[in-house]
Amino acid sequence: MPRYEIHGHAIVSEDDCIAEPDGAMPPALRNDADWRRFQHELDKAALQVVGRFSHETFPNRAGRRRMVVSSQVDGVELRNDVWWWNPGEASLGEALKKAAPDGGLIAVPGGRRVNDLFLSLGFDAFHLARHAGVRIPGGIPVFSRAWAAGSAERLLASHGLHPTPPVILDPEASVSVTVWVR
Ligand SMILES: NC(=O)c1ccc[n+]([C@@H]2O[C@H](COP(=O)([O-])OP(=O)(O)OC[C@H]3O[C@@H](n4cnc5c(N)ncnc54)[C@H](OP(=O)(O)O)[C@@H]3O)[C@@H](O)[C@H]2O)c1
């Protein structure tokens, strides 16, 4: 039986957003130190799981194994080296058995609806990077219920995750990351 460890990843603004209202990621939210760390984490993963918009926004240039979540596919399908998964038609276990049969680290960069899905299925860890000083009014929150919960951190805590000590990635830009673990 393969074993999986599921890690979510996001960089969020001070107001818990991952993108502008139209889905674009504002340059102010991006950070080189966070990007390098994120790429390193993706390199360690057996599979990355992204929503269809994220797949279209960030083409898989590094050629990593990727699974795209979409309601527009039948169950689990392989198309041009990319796995596609419809959670309404196949379980996560079925999808992972096909896309990552040997088990391993599963990296989940989101976006929002994918984060919601895995929050209910259960993250083993969530790498929450925060860019202090950047606000995205009306933007897309990292989780649909982040604001209702008070913050992304409170929502993660309410799902049984605990913070490890934060790491400052870029002191000048006020970017830090906290890994929340089960
Ligand atoms: N700051 C960050 O760390 C970060 C991380 C990731 C993304 N982003 C940004 O956020 C932007 C938008 O993200 P988003 O949250 O709007 O979109 P997203 O999650 O990347 O994609 C949404 C689409 O994924 C599919 N999907 C997601 N969850 C599903 C579910 N449970 N069941 C069936 N289908 C599901 C649907 O595709 P169908 O319409 O095909 O059914 C849905 O329209 C991205 O374009 C990117 O720029 C930022």
Image (cartoon, rainbow, N blue to C red):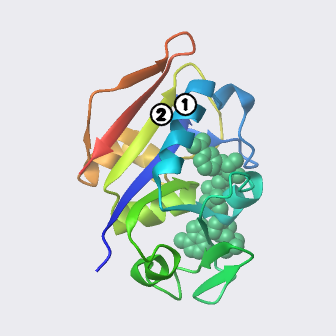
* Residue at 27 percent of width and 27 percent of height: 165
> Quarter of the picture for ligand 1?
bottom right
Identify residue for label 1.
Answer: 34
In front: 129, or 4? 4
Callout 2: CB less than 8 Å from ligand 1:
yes
The image quarter containing residue 79 is: bottom right
Amino acid at circle 2: Ala
Residue 121, placed above or below residue 181: below
Q: Earlier in the sequence, mark 1 or mark 2?
A: 1
Comparing 179 with 5, the one in front is 5
Q: Is residue 160 left or right of residue 37?
A: left
Q: Residue furthest top?
A: 172
Label pair 1/2, CB-CB below 8 angstroms: yes
Amino acid on which disc 1 is placed: Asp
Let me know if residue 112 appears in the view.
yes
Residue 64 — which label? none
Q: Which residue is denoted by mark 2 in the rendering?
A: 129
Q: Residue at x 65, y 30 (%)?
A: 30
Point 55% across, 9% down: residue: 172
Can you give x and y, in whole percent of width and height, for residue 152 in the image? Answer: 41, 42
Q: Quadrant of the image for the N terminus? A: bottom left
Tell me the crowding category of disc 2: few under 14, some 14 to 19, or many 20 or more residues within 10 angstroms, Cα based. many
